[in-house]
Image: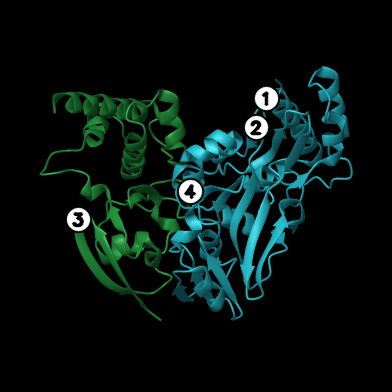
Amino acid sequence: MSTRINVTVNGLQYSHMVEPRLLLVNYLRDVLRLTGTHVGCDTSSCGACTIHVNGKATKCCTLLAVQADGCEITTIEGLSHNGELHPLQEGFNECHGLQCGFCTPGMIMMAADLLQHNPQPTEESIRHALEGNFCRCTGYQNIVKSVQYAAEKMKMSEAVH
Amino acid sequence: MIPVAFDYEKVKTVEEAIAALSGDDLKILAGGHSLIPAMKLRLSRPGKLIDIGGITALKDIKEEDGEIVIGAGATHADIMYHNLIRTHLPFFTEGAATIGDMQVRNWGTIGGSLAHADPAADWPAMVLAADATIEMQGVKGRRNIKATEFFTGLFATVLEPNELITAVRIAIPPDGTKSTYQKFAQPASRFALAACAVMRFPDGRTNIAFTGVGDHAFRDTGAEQAISGKAIDDASVEAAMLAALQNVDVMSDHYASEPYRRHLSKVYLKKALMAVKS
């Protein structure tokens, strides 16, 4: 039995027949070929598959594609605009927030959710927000710095506008 | 990991959900953050999922007739961010923030957590301490049951197979009520190795509930009697710790042995009582 889903992903509309058991992460990676979203643990522990569903950070290895029917989805591919990096992407670049880079898309998508709710987070609230995202390389220090960089940059650009 | 194939029906109202619940071998899908992992591991193989995630009426959090009414479909994050909850049930705000991680809190629901009845889940202890009423609806109509009578064992509740939880109701506590949720979290899963929820009323009445300790969350009447109506001081806290967990079968697993978990529970009772001390 297949079910039709209609979703908006990074601003583009898609309509597909999917098996109910198809996980959203597999829909994004295998059907839409958006492979920036990674499968790490596949058990909703590591956060590498974090995307936004209706603006909320979501581990899409733990969501069925059919649950996202009618939803707006943003993946790491949808974060930059007109070739300009999102402040978080820039921050991870500037502050050496990654080594192997496998966890980075999930880290950035989770941090983007945090900055929506809390534009000027403390170090403690950054660490609390990222507790569902594992990095096995950096020891997290530079990830926290990268998020702080982005928060600062977003505050500056807010002041300019 | 991919679940076994299943049929899927998305419902828009509680009535549609109840009509869909007439078959066998089906499961209700709310946020799915306990169910889907279990299905991926093929520990759970339902033939059909009834997806109630689209029932907007179940997501409401409101004040009604002196009660806070939390729709069963409200997510942990919805509850954590809600001002009504922050004002009247601050320990729900505090406790919700300790469930899983942010991504899990964005999908997991209070109704799902209560129905699943994981022995180490957070909401069961909080709703027990708040003396909540669980509202359920099924083919035979609506019924309300006290949280104290809801949990019956390991992953077991009084819910019938063709019933779903629709809301959690809590009488608004009087001004001056203090509450807390103190958890020692398993460092990877954030489930409770032991946790204690306490609600202390201005007249000294004290509700004490534990989760992560026995095969289901429970109110500790021994500890409650030892501290209720008394000032919270070293002697009364000591007495409550001594009285706690009498006749409780404390779990033992590879994370925590029975004596360690028993000790930890009492330490977290003490932390909770100190947190509500006026």
Label 2 to label 4, Cα distance in Å? 22 Å
Q: Colour of chain B?
A: cyan
Instruction: Kindly indicate whether the residues beneath marks 1 and 2 are on one polypeptide chain.
Output: yes
Q: Report which quarter residue A102 is drawn in.
A: top left
Q: Colour of chain A?
A: green
| Callout 1: SS | helix
Mark 4 in CB contact with mark 1 (< 8 angstroms)? no
Q: Position of residue A115 (x, y in %)?
A: 33, 34
Q: Earlier in the sequence, mark 4 or mark 1?
A: 4
Label 4 to label 1, Cα distance in Å? 27 Å
Report the residue marked by disc 3. Answer: A11
Within-10-Å neighbours for mark 3: few <14, some 14–19, many 20+? few
Which residue is depicted at the point 72% across and 40% down? B256
Label 1 to label 3, Cα distance in Å? 48 Å
Chain letter, disc 3 residue: A
Within-10-Å neighbours for mark 1: few <14, some 14–19, many 20+? some
- Amino acid type, label 3: Gly
Q: What is the image's colouring?
A: by chain
Report the residue marked by disc 4. Answer: B104
- Amino acid type, label 1: Ala
Q: Earlier in the sequence, mark 1 or mark 2?
A: 2
Residue B252 visible from this viewpoint: no
Mark 1 in CB contact with mark 2 (< 8 angstroms)? yes
Report the residue marked by disc 1. Answer: B275
Chain letter, disc 4 residue: B
- Amino acid type, label 2: Thr
Label 3 to label 2, Cα distance in Å? 43 Å
A16 displayed left or right of B136: left
Mark 2 in CB contact with mark 4 (< 8 angstroms)? no
